[in-house]
Amino acid sequence: MQDEHVQVKGSIIDGETRCTHYNSELDVIAIKFYCCKEYYPCHLCHSEHADHSPEVWPAEKFDQHAVLCGKCGLELTVDEYMNCGSHCPSCKAGFNPGCSLHAHLYFGTV
């Protein structure tokens, strides 16, 4: 279950960060957008709910927490997320490997 101290915005449909756009069993991460430092389940949620354009995380900041596991609430750095093999290092929940197709929308020069 998601950490109660971390707020996730967007079109959320459950307590594990699934949204109306991505809601398979593996869609359990939220991304902290660099532009606003707010967590959203996906780029579409950010587009619908934020009042600004998204900005990607610069490569030199990949050591900062930017990904939330919706199962256990662990915050991962971009580097940790990109190297976790699509599984949470804490609770071992599976993450959707297809998210890598959208990495350019969140993280610069991946």
Image (tube, helix red, strand yellow):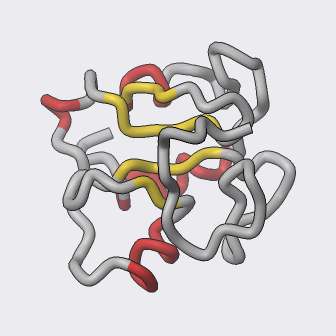
Q: Residue at x 67, y 75 (%)?
A: 21
35 relative to 28, above or below: below
Identify the image quadrant of the C terminus: top left
Residue 12 or 59: which is nearer the viewer?
Answer: 12
* x, y percent for residue 47: 40, 80
* x, y percent for residue 94: 77, 32
* x, y percent for residue 9: 49, 65
Identify the image quadrant of the N terminus: top right
47 relative to 81, above or below: below
51 relative to 43, above or below: below
* x, y percent for residue 15: 74, 53
Q: Residue at x 48, y 29 (%)?
A: 75
Q: Residue at x 61, y 45 (%)?
A: 29
Residue 99 or 38: which is nearer the viewer?
Answer: 38
Residue 94 or 74: which is nearer the viewer?
Answer: 74
Q: Residue furthest front?
A: 4
Q: Residue at x 50, y 21 (%)?
A: 83
Q: Residue furthest top?
A: 90
Horizontal relation, residue 21 to residue 83: left or right = right
- The total of numbered circles placed on residues is 0
Horizontal relation, residue 67 to residue 89: left or right = left
Q: Residue furthest right?
A: 25
Horizontal relation, residue 43 to residue 88: left or right = left
